[in-house]
Amino acid sequence: MKTWMLGAALIAAGGAVQAQDLTLQLKWVTQGQFAGYYVAKDKGFYEEEGLDVTILPGGPDIASTQVLAGGGADVIVEWMPAALAAREKGLPLVNIAQPFKSSGMMLTCLKESGITDPKTDFKGKTLGVWFSGNEYPFLSWMSQLGLSTEGGPDGVTVLKQGFNVDPLLQKQAACISTMTYNEYGQVLDAGIAPEDLVTFKYEDQGVATLEDGLYVLESTLEDKAKVTDLVKFVRASMKGWKYAEEHPEEAAQIVLDNDETGAQTLDHQVRMVQEIGKLTAGSTGVLDEADYQRTVDTLMAEGSDPVISKAPEGAFNHIITDRAFD
């Protein structure tokens, strides 16, 4: 009897299913913007699904789309404008899930600049803009306003902004790009009072586009084993996001524990996770087709330089979320 039990145990051990490797490439550095993924890994949500997930931080010299195209990741976090622009240029990206329901992007301006209405007051001003794919919503907005981005009294001068708030602090620009969960807080931390600022959220201006979606290559969805892994990954990731919404302090500490640069502080990460929770609130991870269409319409709006020239086909697929949350 004992010999039989030992043999059965050995067979069971030998037949144990090995965790499937999956690599996620983030859009930016390790921070609260990606708390859901770090929480899912730390709390064992991926492990429970039989996954061994590697999370690769991004940075100013890392383009997630290029990493995916080169085979360096299975899935990436990317903003939809950049993804659709890349798709039109020939990279077959597909959105498989959308953890972020709302946009956190805005322009933050010094009140002393006299800007109160984008339709009339941006003319002749210098505006700080991020590139690396983040410029697309801005360019679409300016296009809809009929403002040239080549400067001059009837256009705007675009300052290629680094990922900091220095141009506003040094008054090199009337407005700069900020995220509700990051750079806006940095401006306040630098000593500028909220009453000395004017903000224009892309959501309020009707030009909000989807941010921080999950994307894969079309070919990945033709691999049944990969599809199964992605179903598990999305399900565990959304569990991580909802946990982060409910436990922002713990989530912030988990992010901090994964930051190898030592550049982050707990207070900043707690604030970031709390603000990010407002953007993931209400999301089930399933891409809302109305939100998708709003993004496409914004990017194709009439003007001098639409971001995409034609309506995309096959740019999203619900196969993963249909299986993850059925």
Image (cartoon, grey):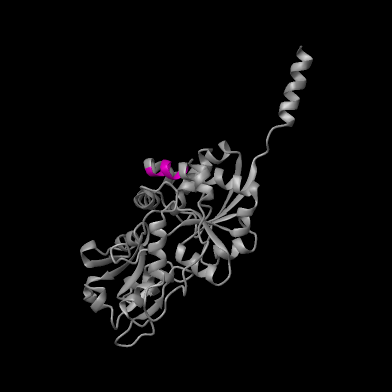
Which residue is drawn at the image coordinates 22% and 74% (left, top)?
112
Residue 236: in magenta span: no
Q: Position of residue 246 (x, y in %)?
A: 37, 40
In this rendering, the answer to whether 195 lies above or below 281 is below
Compared across the picture, whether 272 is left or right of 8 comes to left
The residue shown at (53%, 49%) is 319
| Image coordinates for residue 159, horizontal then vertical, percent | 39, 78
Q: Quadrant of the N terminus?
A: top right
Do we see residue 311 in this rendering?
yes
Image coordinates for residue 234, horizontal then vertical, percent = 52, 46
Comparing 167 with 45, the one in front is 45
Magenta-colored stretch includes residue 243:
yes
| Quadrant in which residue 115 is drawn | bottom left
Quarter-of-image position of residue 116: bottom left
Secondary structure mainly formed by the magenta segment:
helix
Nearest to the observer: residue 240 or residue 87? 87
Q: Is residue 299 left or right of residue 184?
A: right
Percent position of residue 223, x then y: 65, 51
Q: Nearer the viewer, residue 259 or 242?
A: 242
Q: Which residues are magenta?
A: 240-245
Q: Residue furthest top?
A: 1
The answer to which quarter of the image holds residue 296 is bottom left
**Number of disc labels:** 0
Residue 186 vs 16, above or below: the answer is: below
Taking the spot 72% from the left edge, 23% from the top edge, the residue there is: 9
Is residue 164 in view from this perspective?
A: no
